[in-house]
Image: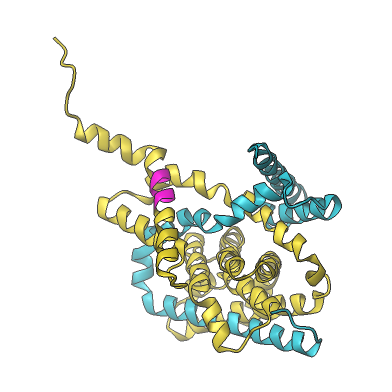
Chain colours: A cyan, B yellow
């Protein structure tokens, strides 16, 4: 199979992000450009309904397979703040992890209960 | 006569640490090692992103290379986060038959998640003895990095520290999020996805995608809506949490 579809797929992603970034700035919206770009790309997918072998699917699928790679540089940034993090270690650790746990648990339990209430589960 | 070869370790090191090539190679190499460890051990806790961050971070500390120099190469990888966020529309499209019928649980989940995350971040940090600045720095940490950063700056937190906390919240979700949801008996894939996206943004979504396409789709949507909810709700809730 040719690699051209992947290239086309990447071009579509870049274009959607570009549209998102420009619109966000033009209208002074509170959402990040890529998030609006995601909605633009969703619209493209809903209209075009591409097959799994098409460029619109293969390019994005490749990026999503290695999504964790893309977070590594930001994650390494923690190293730059080790001193600050260490200085206020207790309140930062407690605030971060307890609040993370409460946010995750509340959302999971509420939505889990709601979907059960509304019937039809997805497992 | 000019000698054909010399020995220039100092110049070479200076070039190496400031060139994009080292940061880029280190990042991709550490991620490849992370994937290998994750597959080889079959241990869900050893997420590739966690292994890679520890390897690269450790290497930078050992070699005394500043983060800014590493970013010369690292930013080439980080750039693709934008297009990858756009790409999250793909699972959303594939699971659209489930998504369109779940408007009520999605919106409820995102609002509950954002309110609990923001309020508990401020209150727990306060109870643990931190001052106002750190409380504000913690407040938007559940939203995806560009949003948490912007909100933190807007309300008077320390944006760069917020970014670090946001990443830790994300990695925590990728590493132990599904385990916590198991313990709580949350089995519905939609609920699991929405919870991971609400508490751990894109990094949580990367783990949700590992678990199932459905979970990934709901996590992606939840991440996007949580970004919006956080930017709208943080200034509002701070009025109540003086």
Q: Which quadrant is the N terminus of chain B positioned in?
A: top left
Q: Residue at x 69, y 44 (%)?
A: A9
Q: Residue at x 81, y 50 (%)?
A: A44
Residue located farthest toward the right when viewing the structure as drawn: A47
**Camera sees residue A110:** yes
| Magenta residue span | B23-29
Residue B152 sits inside the magenta stretch: no
Residue B24 sits inside the magenta stretch: yes
Q: Which quadrant is the C terminus of chain B positioned in?
A: bottom right
Q: Is residue A58 above or below residue A97?
A: above
Q: Report the predominant secondary structure element of the magenta stretch.
A: helix
From the viewer's side, name the closer residue of B228 and B8: B8
Q: Is residue A120 above or below residue B154?
A: below
Tell me where residue B229 appears, x and y as whole percent. 70, 70
Tell me where residue B202 appears, x and y as whole percent. 59, 63
Q: Quadrant of residue B46?
A: bottom left
Q: Quadrant of residue B201?
A: bottom right
Tell me where residue B171 appears, x and y as whole percent. 49, 68
Tell me where residue B17 appears, x and y as whole percent. 32, 41
Q: Residue at x 80, y 87 (%)?
A: A119
From the viewer's side, name the closer residue of B67 and B196: B196
Would residue B217 be found to the left or right of residue B22 on screen? right
Q: Residue at x 63, y 85 (%)?
A: B186
**Camera sees residue B239:** no
């Amino acid at each position: 199979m040719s690699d051209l579809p992947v290239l086309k797929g990447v071009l579509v992603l870049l274009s959607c992000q570009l549209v998102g970034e420009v619109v966000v700035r033009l209208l002074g919206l509170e959402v990040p450009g890529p998030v609006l770009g995601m909605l633009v790309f969703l619209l493209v997918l809903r209209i075009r309904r591409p097959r799994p072998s098409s460029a619109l699917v293969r390019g994005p699928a490749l990026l999503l397979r290695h999504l964790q790679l893309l977070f590594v540089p930001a994650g390494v940034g923690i190293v730059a703040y080790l001193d600050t993090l260490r200085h206020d270690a207790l309140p930062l650790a407690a605030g971060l992890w307890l609040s993370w746990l409460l946010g995750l648990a509340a959302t999971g339990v509420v939505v889990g209960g709601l979907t059960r209430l509304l019937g039809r589960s997805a497992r | 006569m000019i000698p054909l070869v010399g020995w220039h370790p100092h110049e070479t090191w200076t070039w190496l640490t400031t060139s994009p090539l080292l940061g880029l190679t280190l990042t991709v190499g550490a991620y490849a090692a992370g994937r290998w460890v994750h597959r080889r051990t079959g241990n869900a806790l050893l997420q590739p992103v966690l292994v890679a961050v520890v390897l690269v971070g450790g290497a930078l500390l050992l070699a005394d290379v500043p983060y800014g120099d590493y970013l010369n190469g690292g930013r080439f990888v980080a750039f693709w986060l934008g297009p990858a966020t756009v790409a999250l529309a793909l699972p959303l499209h594939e699971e659209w038959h489930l998504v369109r019928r779940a408007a009520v649980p999605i919106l409820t989940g995102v609002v509950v998640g954002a309110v609990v995350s923001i309020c508990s971040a401020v209150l727990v940090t306060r109870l643990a003895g931190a001052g106002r600045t750190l409380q504000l720095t913690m407040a938007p940490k559940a939203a995806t990095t560009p949003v948490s950063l912007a909100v933190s700056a807007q309300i008077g937190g320390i944006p760069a520290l917020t970014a670090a906390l946001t990443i830790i919240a994300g990695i925590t979700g990728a590493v132990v999020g599904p385990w916590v949801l198991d313990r709580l008996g949350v089995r519905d894939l939609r609920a699991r996805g929405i919870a991971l996206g609400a508490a751990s943004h894109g990094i949580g979504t990367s783990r949700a995608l590992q678990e199932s396409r459905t979970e990934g789709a709901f996590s992606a949507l939840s991440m996007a809506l949580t970004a919006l909810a956080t930017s709208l709700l943080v200034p509002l809730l701070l009025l109540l949490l003086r």
